[in-house]
Amino acid sequence: MRTYRISQLAARSGVPATTLRFYEDAGLLPADRTPSGYRVYGEDAVERLAFVSSAKLLGLALEEIRELLDVREEGVCASVRARMLPLVADRIQATDGRIAELRAFAAHLAGVHADLSGPAPAGACGPDCGCTTTSALAAGPVPVTLSPTRPASGPGAEVWREAPVACTLGGAELGERTEQWRTLVARAERREEIDDGLRLSFPPDADLAGQLAALAAAEQGCCAFFDFTLHLTPDALQLSVRAPESAAGMLADLFGAPA
């Protein structure tokens, strides 16, 4: 029976070695040890990783995937399907909620964009110029908090604090996502430290706000330990990002250090 060292399995599956170690600790990917202490994975590891990656793409939490793997070990596909059905139904409901949030935010941005596209008065900005008294902004600042990728464990719970600090993207996908963030973050006019993270301030650009919202939603799908809040005001667009202390390095890599 063929076995794999961790570097071989990473190359074969496209999953980084750091993620393989995390999956072992999380009970998703068992590994044996050689007499010298090296990890050795069984022949079924590649197929098992494919199942884990597929489940992650569905937005399932690690504990749900672990439970599915236990059912899968029994060798009855019908049992796995029966367990997956309610989990996927829950994700459909959660996704519909996220779509509704983003549509509402997009509609608000469209109103702001329409107001700002009208003719500007001559001279400097003033109370009646439209920059601060447009109808779309009459109700004041609009905070948009992206929903967590999995339900909270109790009232007021901050799910991102309990999420495992591990990214499920690998290889080219991870590099592409990092580049997307760095391109948008480069447009920030200011960085400031907040509790557990930082706040980035951008010009109040509707298209940029939409790009930030879409990328933050995608990021939560692979890194549930990040917490994002978009805040739109008449004068600025702000993105607040928080993460557990153990993810401080990843936070700095993607979003930079406060000024």
Image (cartoon, rainbow, N blue to C red):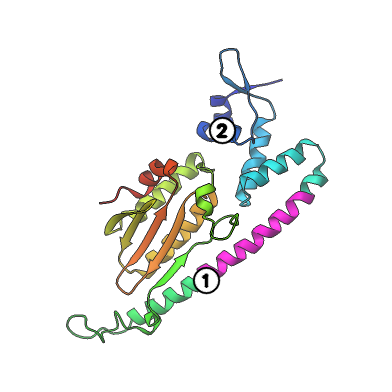
Q: Is the residue 233 above or below the residue 253 in the image?
A: below
Q: Position of residue 133 (x, y in %)?
A: 32, 83
What residue occupies the far top of the structure in this picture?
35
Residue holding disc 1: 103
Q: Position of residue 199 (x, y in %)?
A: 34, 57
Q: Picture quarter containing residue 127?
A: bottom left
Residue range highlighted in magenta: 82-102
Dominant secondary structure (helix, strand or loop) of the stretch shown in magenta: helix
Please report the residue visible at 63 percent of the width from the left and 52 percent of the height from the top: 58
Foreground residue, 146 or 118? Answer: 146
Foreground residue, 74 or 2? Answer: 74
Q: Tell me if residue 90 can be seen.
A: yes
Residue holding disc 2: 20
Q: Disc 2 or 1, which lies upstream in sequence?
A: 2
Using residue 143 as the reference point, say whether residue 134 is left or right of it: left
Q: Is residue 93 magenta?
A: yes
Q: What amino acid is labelled 1 in the image?
A: Arg
The N terminus lies in which quarter of the figure?
Answer: top right
Q: Residues within 10 Å of mark 1 (few under 14, many from 20)?
A: few
Q: CA distance from mark 2 to mark 1?
A: 37 Å
Q: Is the residue 194 above or below the residue 93 in the image?
A: above
